[in-house]
Amino acid sequence: EDALFYTPGNFTNNGFTQNQGDMVVAGHWRNSNVYQGIGALTLSGEKTQIIINNNQAINKLIIEGGGQKFLVGNLKVTDELHLENGLFTTSMTDSLWLSSKVKISGGSQFSYINGPLGQLGSGPKFYPIGTDEYYTPIEFSEILGANPAVVIIADFDSGFQPQTEGDYVAVSPVSYKINLASGFVENYEMILPPKESYFEYDQVAAIWSESGNDMYKTVSSSSDRFLLPGIANKVGLIAIETPVNNGGQKFYFSKSLSPNAFDEENKSVRVYGNELLEEDFSLTVFNRWGIIVYETNSLEEMQDSGWNGKQKQNGELVQSGSYPFILRATKFTGEKIEEKGIISVFR
């Protein structure tokens, strides 16, 4: 017990493997026979890893190394899932399932479930999922039902324009498909996601539709909870008021850009407002590997022209995706600001 097994290459099991400690594998994982034990499996590869576990369970699964992991077949995690660095790619035919009491930790733009994720049982549920290079998790304070098995799939569609019962100011490009694989769900209590770079509005409502129906119904709430019926098949968010601090005197930093946008304002990210001092200002933008693609100490530059997605080193446009940033500044009042987040680039 508590032993460590490490291989920088592939691991193939054609017989019987009992894991009571920690196994760390940097290459492909191929189990064609029997795998058992309460130990942890860490997938640590910096390059692509293929995961085949013969439709058997793993007690604790850890994703590290930064390389993308591709699941082949079905896999169940029974105790813990930790997402540190790297995408774990699934599909409707290659399914990852979490038992009802699995502890989930980590999850970020650098590490998430890239595809469908299924969870068993009722109660609070967190889905650390994403798609198309965007981390778009969804959380439920309660899934109320009888032995439900619920699969959630994230979809990022910047052209998503749903038909709803009422008017809306804007619609989030992120929506979620809910697939009840088995059991019964009475309702889902969805927690409002934190404001993201692609959807920063003060007052939002949830929208949902049932299978086979293109008309979305609206659920408003005075809190950060939305109660969705068990028949909900697709869920999204709409804005019913104006953006946060949009163009006013207060400090505001836009966080999405598209070089092909019709509106010039949307071709770059900028700093708005007149609260900040020119000195002590800095903005640094990174790619997903932590390499700096843009940095400036000029508040005037960020207010006038902003960052248009071009790398400062060679002037080339970055690819579509999510780019972490750190913005530091000082207000005229002396208050220090440090804002961290994601800039979304659409090409």
Image (cartoon, rainbow, N blue to C red):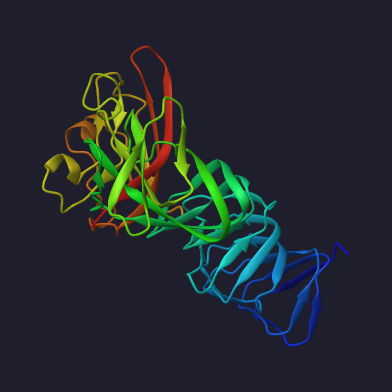
- In screen coordinates, is 224 left or right of 199? right
Residue at x-position 63% and y-position 70%: 75
Residue 344 visible in rendering: yes
User: Residue 301 at x, y = what percent?
Assistant: 22, 35
Quarter of the picture containing the C terminus is bottom left
Q: How many marks?
A: 0
- In screen coordinates, is 294 left or right of 44? left
Residue at x-position 41% and y-position 40%: 341
Q: Quadrant of residue 221?
A: top left
Residue toward you, 148 or 311: 148
User: Residue 81 at x, y = what percent?
Assistant: 65, 56
User: Residue 335 at x, y = what percent?
Assistant: 42, 17
Q: Quadrant of residue 37?
A: bottom right
Residue toward you, 297 or 184: 184
Q: Is residue 66 above or below residue 202?
A: below
Quarter of the picture containing the N terminus is bottom right
Q: Is residue 82 above or below residue 285?
A: below
